[in-house]
Image (cartoon, coloured by chain):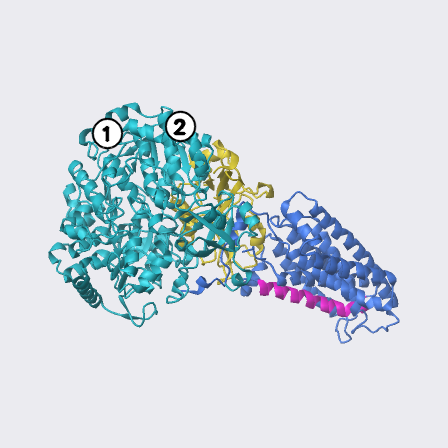
Amino acid sequence: MKEEHNWGWPIASYLFLGGLGGGMIVVAGFADLAFGRGEPFSLGSLLAGIAVAIGSALLIFELGRPFRFWRVLSREKAIMTAGAWLLSFTIFTSFAYFSFWPDFSPWRQLVGLRHFASGINIVLGLGVCIYTGILLGSLRARAFWNTPILPVLFLVSGISTGVAAQSLLAGSWPCHGTAGDLGAVHAALRSCDLALVVFELIIVFVYVGMMRFSAGPVTARIAAQWLTGPKKWPFWGGLVGLGLALPGTLYGLSSAAGGETAPILVLIGGVVLRFLVVYSDERVRLPGESEYYARLPGPDAPFLKAWE
Amino acid sequence: MARFAMIMDTRRCIGCHSCTVACKVNNGLPLDMIYNPVFTSGPTGVFPHVSMTFYPLLCMHCKNPPCVGCCPSGASRQEADGIVWVDQNTCIGCKACIQACPYRARHQNAETGTVQKCDFCKERVREGLEAFCVETCHQRARIFGDLDDPGSAVSQMVNGMNTLQLLPEIGTDPQVYYIVSPGGQG
Amino acid sequence: MSSKEDLKREASAVRKSCCFFCHQNCGVLAYVKDGGVLAIEGDPEHPVSRGGLCARGNIALQHLNHPARINVPLKRVGGRGSGRWERVSWDEALDEIAARLTSLKEGYGAETVATAGGTQRANDWARRRFMNLFGSPNGFHNAHLCWIPTFMVETAVYGWCPFEIDLANSRLIVLWGHNPGTSGMPEMRGIADLKQNGLKVIVIDPRYTETASKADLWLPLRPGSDVALALAWLNVIIWEGLYDQTFIENCCTGFEELAEHVRQYTPEWAAPLTWLDPELIRKGARMYAGNRPGNIQWGVSIDQSGRSAGAGIHARALLRAVTGNLDAPGSDLLSGPSPDFITDEEMEANEWLPEEQKAKQIGSDRYKLTTWPGYGRIAAITKEVWGKAPTAEWMCEAHPPSVFKAMLTEKPYPVKALIVLATNPINSYGRTDLVLEALRKVGFLVTMEYWMTPTAMLSDYVLPAASPLERPTITTTYGCSDTLIASERAIQPMFERRTDYEFWRGLGLRMGQEEMWPWENLEEAFYYRIYPLGYDVSSYDEFVERHRFHFPEREYYKYGRVGFATPSRRVELVSSTLQELGYPAMPTYAAPVENEIDDPDLARKFPLVLTSGSGFMPFHHSEHFQIKELRYLKHEPYADINPETAKDLGISMGDWVWIETRRGRIRQKANLTQAVHPRVVVTQRGWWYPEREAAEPELGGCTESNANVLTDVSDEACDPLGGSWANRGLLCRVYRVDKSEADGR
């Protein structure tokens, strides 16, 4: 039997949600600190916190012993430990930042404190985006992940999906502005995401290209699967086409309708990217390994249930 | 302090799977969990000029174990004598260590949710007994011992013979060494 | 769970038992308490196994405690094979069986009752004892496939079978159709140890086996062509002057005749028959003759060749003689039977079988060597020279296919009853459809077993057999060695299991044989056997505890003192015994019964050459498919086929394929491998599916992947000397199972 994927859809989903949430609070924090326009992105901060929380819940769900999850908040030096702390703080600070914005908020007027929270959120958000790539990249046994490009890719993708989500939510409650006010915001977000999408396309091609022409048997094989093999539809169709090229084009054309579709496509692309990566976790095979496991019985072999 | 290592003499290994079964039944492993499979490499070549080698695998108890550094709960640890093991009471089953292991040596127990693996039969070897896989092998193809003891068989073999490690390029410095005869003929 | 050491500490005693799942009988230390076994491990003090245990040995407790074990006597309710049983007591079962056998004897003569065994697993002397006293000559095993024809030919030629290999002093060993890498763990270890000191290894095998991968020379001959190879080796050794002149002059007769006889069997003659290059054939012969002393280790392949088996065995036997590799240090030793302990043959009560009953032994009219005509002659000589005879239960047996045919045709007379013990004939005897038909039809079928095997499923009574840990065991190489290793019971049999000894004795006591069964249990019988050795012990168990084995001082060149146990007291290169029995006095080429040279039409239809039934870990014949820890490692059957051939046939790795001969077809998965010649196919043996229904018509899937569906037991296919039927070198074809059928599984 083929080596099962040890990390499946919950992890892939978490990677997306984590990157998404991190990106969203980076956008919110940046808009607030650099441009003083934090309010349109306030709801986004709440949803970012929820996204990261859902992602974390998926991680816990995925554990073999979910009730022991608290052990991950240890003093170990593992990347995952750092990540767990990071996620925990991020959830808290996202909600905390959001809490400055509703009219009923007791500390609505504490702008200085809110700016401080923005700053923290930017750092944490970037951290959450990049940490997932660092984690995967550190696992040298998984040849396709073992590259410094991966954290960069996940960072860019995280910010990009954050921008996309924020552009869909921009101006929502508790924001007081009108649609007209948001014209400049949307234009800025569009340009920003266009740049990110283009940058991400380049990184994707560099990544896959490098892997395709690498010496390692696994990396070349997986890259070929993405480019021309069984994964070509998700790669070309899902990630490159729907997830990057098409939204990039729509952003470039600057139409209103395109402006609403493109971010959704970017989000889809973000999901597809994480799934593609998580399911490309092959190891270099040891001599004779594949044949051995191919011949072991699957869980439904009749003899397994006999003589209970 | 000891530093444990194992030598697989593939000139003697005949791929009989006795070690696989001895480990499984003596350690009470779940049916579908195999700590030490024995792979068959070959026959390579074209009939009748062929060769074949058997590779028994298990946890390599690496000197730089990637599975220890990545463990967020501290369940996966390495002792001073080099043995890598998992504390079943602490493991949360996140499987980072499984993802980190190049040798497919770690396995999640479907019932307990935790990760387990070969621990060189640590209780046994520390009392001077043999690991089950070593004890059962008729061919004496598995040699276990202390690398810090210059008189031990493993020391002499590692230092005196051509041995190789599997996947050395990944950089984990596995402490299971293979004697493979030249030309691949086992 | 408690560690093994904890369990061992809990035990109240440690028993020196053994594993019984193959002939090596590796030592097992059993930690016991309150009638149960807590833990087992290999016995480091066992002289042969030295603490090792193979995959089978390691599952002793899984075997002992398996939920599918037969634990109580069962009697059939409803039709044969219906799968419905009622529990009966041992007394009831034995009473009824004894009564039935008695009445059958009255109606049809004792010869109407036959017994079937497998490979050596039980106290076969007890079986023979009962049958002799009862009056039936029709006991048999798979002997014809396994060593016995070899033993008898070699005894005919040089007075005993030189199966004891003085490997420690040897320079070379030929493993002829033998793969200790999968079937003889301690033996393989010995070879590996000695290889490091320069021992050379030649492997003769169509398949690149585990052992072949360690060999210095591998001869991948056409399955079934061993006789041609052996004759060509004789030709090379004799005509290149590589023979041992001194030994031949001092100890042999008939050299000139033999030399003339083998002149025609050149390597060039043998090449198209063996598919080996003549130079390779020469190389092997020169290597064997040039590295003296050397050994030829017997393997089952020649015994299983069918029609050419006897000739092949004979030719191979002479190789030792012409090179002087007999009873010299480092060669194959003619140790002879033990003069010291009571041998199996001495426990068999052969003198009680009347002559007129001996004459009725089925198959003895045609296959004389391993039946009373041949055995009687040969045993008489060995008795004269060695003082003892070879074990009759093995060396003197009815011809199994002929017995099964008699069940169906009533020729030469009706066989109305079969007692099956330590075998699963449906899986292990030739021509499965014949065996099935016979077992369905035979009037009375009794089986003693560990499991509900396909044969047990068809039986009238199924009796629970004791496991290896539940019985004492004496290891003496089928009763023919002068060495003895003794193992004691770990625990008394659990549930209502009993040993085979108690079964035969139980019948004997009910059938007028009381006086002949004075030993109440095996320990008493075994004590009787080891007593003459003169060790100061008061019980068998004490012998095991304090001594464990008896290895007499090795004596080389015994023939100097004793002579060779042949009519001329010399090694007879022209065998007078075989000649008297009506066989060629010298090995004469016989082709495999199905071959492409003599029958090109058949070869067009069946273009590939099959060798069936290769042994493989972790199973043993048809055993252990129920042990999940073992079955998990290999849960489906695989047949070896060359990748070129597979490609031509559109077969990919792992495809289910039909392998078909004239007799029928089976399905196994295709293992594409360069280990075999493009025209050779190797099936695995023993396969059945115990997880399937244990009743008609399924019968545990016993015909689906069972190599014996393909084998040939016709009279033409059987070896004229001993009656070995053809498992090897048959013609077959291979084709993919329809995709739709495969999906259904």
Give the magenta-colored segment's residue range.
Answer: A38-62
| Quarter that holds the N terminus of chain C | bottom left
* Camera-nearest label, 1 or 2: 2
Q: Which chain is blue?
A: A
Q: Secondary structure at mark 1?
A: loop
C107 versus B81 height, above or below: below
Instruction: Using residue C457 as the reference point, say whether residue C112 is left or right of it.
Output: left
- Mark 2 crowdedness (10 Å alpha carbons): few <14, some 14-19, many ≥20: some
**Which residue position holds label 2?**
C286
The Cα atoms of the two marked residues, 1 and 2, are separated by 24 Å
Mark 1 chain? C
A23 versus A179 height, above or below: above
Mark 1 and 2 residues: CB-CB less than 8 Å, in contact? no
> Where does the image place residue B178, in percent across and percent down from the top left?
49, 39
C483 versus A7 height, above or below: above
Going 58% across and 59% down the picture, which residue do you hit? A72
The residue lying toward the viewer, choosing from C481 and C423, is C423
The residue lying toward the viewer, choosing from C468 and B106, is C468
Query: Any magenta on residue C225?
Result: no
**Which residue position holds label 1?**
C557
> Where does the image place residue C549, in percent across and percent down from the top left?
23, 42
Instruction: Using residue C213 as the reference point, say whether residue C510 is left or right of it.
Output: left
**Palette colour of chain C:** cyan
The residue lying toward the viewer, choosing from C396 and C194, is C396
